[in-house]
Amino acid sequence: MSVAFADEHSGFAVMGGCTGQETEASTDDDHACRQHVAVLEDGKWRLGTSPLPDPSGGDGFTADIFALGPGRASITAGTGRNPDRTWFTDDGARTWKSGTTRVTGTVRAVPESAQLTWDCLKAEEQGGCGRSRLVVTMPDSGRRKALAAQPPLAGVVLPAGSSNSGALWASGLDARTGASALAVSHDQGRTWRASKLPGPKATTPGWGLQVVEGQDALYAAEPGQLPEEEEVKNGLRALYRSTDGGRSWARVWTYRPGHEPLSILGDPVAATDGSLTIHGESGVYRSTDGGRSFRRTADAGPPGAPSRTPIGYLGSLGQGSYEVSADGIHWHTFTLGG
């Protein structure tokens, strides 16, 4: 299931489900699978039309939906054989136009409600990406355009979040040292300023950084591969903190063998009470000293991977249930498909 919000009154969700149980004697009709689209309109959910094909067949079907403003959304979906199909709606999922993830043309700035994403420019032999660029999914068409002014970063350049003031963040590598770095734009992507991150250059692959804004500071989480003995898939290498709007950063937390949090799922949760919460593979960890130390907590929001959205932090509880929080402290539950 994939959920996206334009604001507190408008959003979309893709929900999948299959009927019947597959046996040796069953046919495709006995266990048909369907993808449904739900629409939040004026604060109420309704069922919209779905452009998605039957996902059955075991070919690794995935579907993600992105809100591009009230009544507008883009779905990116595909299988291992056809991974780049898209659909766009501007009438609340009543009708859809098919498209592709292919990037055509450029755009000078990121429009309001657009999706900032990325496109691989140089594939690696092992199947990963060696160099990328930022692209924009346009809110009026769902088409993808390359951002004209790219951040001054090397390697795989990825979106890294946004702040309440409208600043856009991107992560990549410092062109000179190859160390992890961030870049920020205060004019919708027209210009960018890079900022170095303190600490040694990592010797294992990283997966981009994610910036979130707290009450009085910015935080950047750096996920990446940890030593095999840690037995985590979503390792957390470091946390950084900035109190001057991202002009400079302090490395407040660094991976140490056996010290939690060793992993991170989703985004850090920077609450209005000044705390910072990390959802990891083995539990939820909360810091009250600016990310310098953490304690495991039994009740700190959803156990899934929280993400920052236009209405606050969104976390999945499973089985179509979600929790949302505007302040990172108080969480409210809603259920889809129930």
Image (cartoon, grey):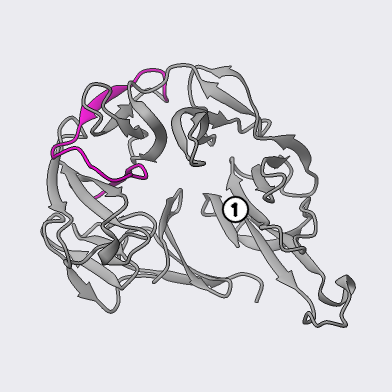
Answer above or below: position of 168 versus 284: above
Task: Say which residue appears at 33% left-offset and 64% top-offset.
Answer: 232
Highlighted range, magenta: 189-215
Looking at the figure, which quarter contains the N terminus? bottom right
Task: Say which residue appears at 40% left-offset and 31% top-offset.
Answer: 157
Answer above or below: position of 144 versus 232: above
Image coordinates for residue 223, horizontal then vertical, percent: 31, 50
The quarter of the picture where residue 227 lies is bottom left
Task: Please rate how many residues cluster around mark 1, counting C-alpha atoms within 10 Å: few if below 14, some from 14 to 19, many from 20.
Answer: many
Circle 1: residue type: Gly
Image coordinates for residue 81, horizontal then vertical, percent: 71, 47
Q: Which residue is mark 1?
A: 11
The mark total stands at 1
**Overall secondary structure of the magenta stretch?**
loop
Task: Say which residue appears at 47% left-offset and 28% top-offset.
Answer: 134
Q: Secondary structure at mark 1?
A: strand
Task: Say which residue appears at 19% left-offset and 37% top-offset.
Answer: 201
The quarter of the picture where residue 259 lies is bottom left
Looking at the figure, which quarter contains the C terminus? bottom right
Answer above or below: position of 183 versus 216: above
Image coordinates for residue 96, horizontal then vertical, percent: 78, 43
Is 142 in the magenta?
A: no
Outermost residue to the front: 125
Q: Is residue 42 left or right of 93 when viewed as pictured?
A: left
Image coordinates for residue 83, horizontal then vertical, percent: 67, 44
Q: Is residue 199 visible?
A: yes
Q: Is residue 211 visible?
A: no
